[in-house]
Image (cartoon, helix red, strand yellow):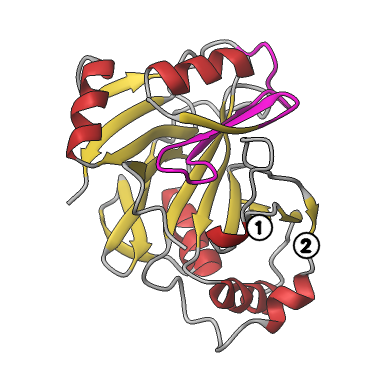
C-alpha cells in the first residue's frame, strides 16, 4: 500500500489558508499529522519524518469559489486497511463529520472537508492482486463502503498518522476534462488509467491514479485569480530518469496547468 514504486508520485501539497493556527490544529487533530516545522507564516505537517502537507498563511487571499478550478480533494493514503479502521474509530469517537464513503474496487475511501472548504479523502489501497483491467482499462467504481467491516479491521487504538502515510493522489477540479487529460499526458507524462463521465484518472507505474481531474462542479472554469485560498502547489517526486524527462517537458522545475495550479519537481532520495 504505497506509491513509492512509481517513477513519479505525489511528494507534497501546499495549501494557502486564512487561519494558519486553526487549520494546522485541524490536520493534527483530525488526521493525526505531526507538525514537522514552520513559523507564523507556514507550517509543514506529515507522518514520521515525512513532511507532505504545507499550509501557507495569506489572510488577504480571496476565499476560493467551490465552482472554480482547483482542488477537489487531497487523498491521504494510510499504509494498511487496519490503519484505516483505527482512523475510523477515531473519527467516530471525536464526532467527525464524514461526508461520504466508497469502495472504489482498487481502494476503500472516506471523505470529509477541512474548515476552509478543502476536500479530504482518507483511504487505503486494496492489494494490487485484486485490481482488474478486463478491457485493458483499470476497473474502478464508486460503490457503497461497508464502514463496519472497515472498523472491524482495526488492530489497535488510533495513535496518529502512522509512518508510511503519504498523499497518494490529488484530485483536481478543472474546466475541461479533455484539456486536463492532454496536460496530464503531454506535460506531466502520466498514463490514463480510467475515466468516468466528466473525469479522467492518470498515474505512472501502473498505480490507479496519482492525479485526477473532473468538471462535476467546475465545467467551463477559467484560470483562477490569485491570490486565493485553496490549492497552491502540487510537488511531484520523481526518480532520476523521470525527473530529467519532466524537467524537459516543463522547461524547468515548475509548470502550471491551464487553470493556474502549479506543479513543481523534486527528486526522489
Q: Which residues are magenta?
A: 195-221
Using the numbered discs, state the Cα–Cα distance from disc 2 to disc 1 in whole angstroms: 8 Å
Q: Are marks 2 and 1 in contact (CB under 8 Å)?
A: yes
**Residue drawn at (36%, 61%), measured in percent from left and top?**
46
**Residue drawn at (58%, 22%), measured in percent from left and top?**
69
Looking at the image, which residue sits at the far bottom? 156
Q: Which mark is residue 109?
A: 1
Residue 226 visible at all: no
Among the 4 quarters of the image, the one containing residue 86: bottom right
Vertical relation: 221 (above or below) 192: above
Local SS, label 1: strand
Of residue 94 and residue 183, the one placed in the foreground of this image is: 183
Looking at the image, which residue sits at the far right? 144
Where residue 258 sits: x, y (%)? 47, 13
Where residue 33 sits: x, y (%)? 42, 65
**Residue drawn at (54%, 45%), measured in percent from left and top?**
208
In this figure, which residue is indicated by the disc labeled 2? Answer: 145
Sequence order check: which comes first, mark 2 or mark 1?
1
Residue 161 visible at all: yes
Where residue 36 sits: x, y (%)? 28, 62
Where residue 122 sits: x, y (%)? 58, 59
Vertical relation: 53 (above or below) 97: above
* Residue 204 inside the magenta-drawn segment: yes
Vertical relation: 238 (above or below) 50: above
Q: Is residue 59 left or right of residue 209?
A: left
Local SS, label 2: loop
* Residue 143 inside the magenta-drawn segment: no
**Residue drawn at (54%, 75%), measured in percent from left and top?**
83
Q: Is residue 231 left or right of residue 53?
A: right
Of residue 240 and residue 172, the one placed in the foreground of this image is: 240
Of residue 258 and residue 183, the one placed in the foreground of this image is: 183
Amino acid at each position: 500500500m504505497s506509491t513509492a514504486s512509481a517513477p513519479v508520485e505525489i511528494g507534497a501539497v501546499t495549501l494557502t489558508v486564512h487561519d494558519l493556527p486553526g487549520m494546522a490544529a485541524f490536520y493534527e487533530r483530525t488526521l493525526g499529522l505531526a507538525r514537522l516545522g514552520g513559523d507564523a507564516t507556514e507550517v509543514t505537517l506529515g507522518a514520521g519524518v515525512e513532511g507532505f502537507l504545507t499550509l501557507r498563511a495569506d489572510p488577504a487571499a480571496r476565499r476560493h469559489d467551490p465552482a472554480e478550478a482547483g482542488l477537489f480533494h487531497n487523498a491521504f493514503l494510510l499504509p494498511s486497511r487496519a490503519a484505516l479502521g483505527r482512523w475510523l474509530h477515531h473519527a467516530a469517537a471525536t464526532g467527525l463529520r464524514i461526508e461520504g464513503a466508497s469502495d472504489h474496487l482498487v481502494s476503500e475511501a472516506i471523505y470529509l472537508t477541512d474548515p476552509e472548504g478543502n476536500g479530504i479523502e482518507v483511504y487505503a489501497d486494496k492489494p494490487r492482486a485484486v485490481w482488474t483491467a478486463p478491457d485493458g482499462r483499470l476497473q474502478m467504481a464508486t460503490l457503497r463502503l461497508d464502514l463496519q467491516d472497515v472498523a472491524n479491521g482495526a488492530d489497535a487504538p488510533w495513535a496518529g498518522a502512522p509512518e508510511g502515510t503519504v498523499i497518494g493522489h490529488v484530485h483536481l477540479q478543472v474546466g475541461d476534462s479533455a484539456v486536463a487529460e492532454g496536460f496530464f499526458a503531454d506535460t506531466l507524462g502520466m498514463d490514463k488509467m480510467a475515466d468516468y463521465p466528466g473525469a479522467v484518472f492518470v498515474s505512472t507505474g501502473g498505480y490507479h491514479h496519482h492525479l485526477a481531474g473532473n468538471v462535476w462542479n467546475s465545467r467551463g472554469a477559467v484560470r483562477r485569480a490569485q491570490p486565493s485560498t485553496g490549492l497552491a502547489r502540487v510537488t511531484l517526486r520523481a526518480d532520476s530518469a523521470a525527473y530529467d524527462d519532466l524537467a524537459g517537458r516543463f522547461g524547468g522545475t515548475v509548470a502550471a496547468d491551464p487553470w493556474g495550479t502549479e506543479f513543481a519537481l523534486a527528486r526522489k532520495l
